[in-house]
Image: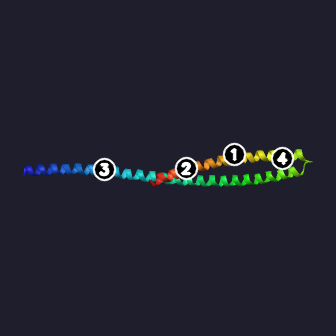
Amino acid sequence: VTVVAVVVTVVAVLLNVVADVVNVVGVSVTVLVVVVRVVNDVVDVTVMVVTVVAVVVTVVVVSVTVVAVVVTVVAVLLNVVADVVNVVGVSVTVLVVVVRVVNDVVDVTVMVVTVVAVVVTVVVVSVTVVAVV
């Protein structure tokens, strides 16, 4: 009877140890699941933010492109006026130079915004790939 009692006690102690190990593993897995969910939420929010930034950059690119087209049309019209009206040549020439400088500034701005849009698009694609993985 004493041997049986000792064996039962040892088995009970071992079962308690196993139960403690299982509890620790369970808590660890729960913490890991929570961490993975938080990381997933952070990635989701990052994808949304980057997408909004990409949309804003796209709107800016389109707006700057429209301005560039308008400035180009005005520059062409001013060139025609300069060719037709030689009497007021100096004033028109100065105005044409100003419009051409503005046109060049708009062209550079369009290029810079386009580069930013490409970078943002690459970031959106990268974050989306990470989110999917």
Relative side of 25 to 6, left or right: right
Q: Nearer the viewer, mark 2 or mark 3?
A: 2
- Residue 21: where, in percent of width, then height? 27, 49
- Residue 74: where, in percent of width, then height? 79, 53
- Dot 2 and dot 4 residues touching (CB under 8 Å): no
Tell me if mark 3 has few (under 14), some (14-19) or many (20+) residues whose alpha carbon lies within 10 angstroms of its own: few
* Upstream in sequence: badge 1 or badge 2: 1
Q: Amino acid at mark 3?
A: Val
* Upstream in sequence: badge 2 or badge 4: 4
Tell me if mark 4 has few (under 14), some (14-19) or many (20+) residues whose alpha carbon lies within 10 angstroms of its own: some
Q: Amino acid at mark 1?
A: Val
Q: Which residue is mark 3?
A: 25
Q: Looking at the image, which residue is at 73% across and 45% down? A: 105
What secondary structure is marked by label 4? helix
- Dot 1 and dot 2 residues touching (CB under 8 Å): no
Q: Which residue is mark 1?
A: 108
Towards the viewer: 21 or 43: 43
Towards the viewer: 107 or 28: 107
Q: Which residue is mark 2?
A: 122
Image mark for residue 126:
none
> Given the current orientation, which residue lies at the most extreme right position?
87
Tell me if mark 1 has few (under 14), some (14-19) or many (20+) residues whose alpha carbon lies within 10 angstroms of its own: few
> Given the current orientation, which residue lies at the most extreme front position?
83
The answer for how far apart the CA atoms under marks 2 and 3 are is 39 Å
Q: Amino acid at mark 4?
A: Leu
The answer for how far apart the CA atoms under marks 2 and 4 are is 40 Å
What secondary structure is marked by label 1? helix
The answer for how far apart the CA atoms under marks 4 and 1 are is 20 Å
Relative side of 14 to 89, left or right: left
Q: Which residue is mark 4?
A: 95
